[in-house]
Amino acid sequence: MKFLLPSFVLALSAAGLDLDVGVTAGSVFPVGSWGEQIGSGLSARAAVQWKPAARLGAGASLGIGIYGDEYDGDASVVMLSPEITGSFHLRPWGRSFNPGIEAGFGMNRTSMECAGGSDPASWDPFWRAGLRWDFGMGSGFRGAIGFDLASILSQRVSSDSFSILFRLSREVEL
């Protein structure tokens, strides 16, 4: 059993595993009826993507979103989003112009706090999809700008949002 982890790492190294490790941050804007109650917010996501081919990526990420009350500022909504992700790029490893798409599916934990108390947290399925403009930054770093459309598929009210994002990532080869 004590040799399992080193054997796994050695097998991955021998396979020449290409990873893209990065963080994404941006502004989030609720849309639809949900947006009438909640103001804009901030989002951040840490992700790891395996690159089986230069054009394709598959991985996992963990995101957090924080929204404020648009009226008197006494409420906040916090969302924690573990997800699986996939991406496709038209010009892989392009230096200056590499358009692509990215999508994620997972579960979203939503909790609301306000001056009068808090609502119980709920776990609901969600999806997100968006366009990215990926570009090289040198020394193995890559940047990307883009946007996402996202929806939480709640039993009571679906929550849709629009995000403007920036990503910084590092290419890692094991």
Image (tube, rainbow, N blue to C red):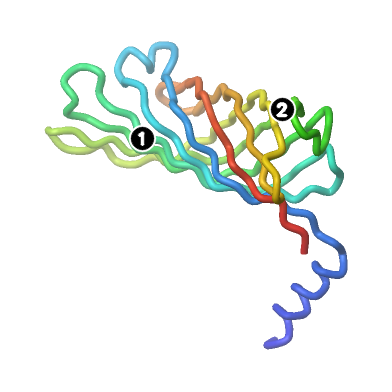
Pointer 1 local density, CA inside 10 Å: few below 14, some 14–19, many at least 20 = many
**Residue 109, labelled with which disc?**
none
- Badge 2 density bin: few <14, some 14–19, many ≥20, Cα 10 Å: some
Front-lying residue, 80 or 100: 100
Picture mark count: 2
Alpha carbons under labels 2 and 1: distance apart:
24 Å
Identify the residue at image location x=87%, y=69%: 14
Is 108 placed above or below 148 here? below
Q: Quadrant of residue 103?
A: top right
155 left or right of 7? left
Horizontal placement of 168 versus 158: left or right?
A: right
Q: Nearer the viewer, residue 63 or 153?
A: 63
User: Which amino acid type corresponds to the residue marked 2 in the rendered image?
Assistant: Ile
When the figure is inspected, residue 156 is found, relative to residue 81, above or below; the finding is: above
Q: Secondary structure at mark 2?
A: strand
Q: Which residue is identified by label 2?
A: 101
Residue lying farthest to the front in this orientation: 138
Quarter in which the N terminus is drawn: bottom right
The residue under label 1 is 66
Q: Identify the residue at image location x=63%, y=37%.
A: 143
> In which quadrant of the rendered view does residue 148 lie?
top right
Instruction: Give the x, y percent position of residue 149.
Output: 56, 22
At 67% from the left and 46% from the top, the residue drawn is 141
Whether 155 is drawn above or below 117: the answer is above
> For the residue labelled by badge 1, is the local secondary structure a helix, a strand or a loop?
strand
Q: Residue furthest left?
A: 116
Whether residue 20 sits left or right of residue 107 in the image: it is right
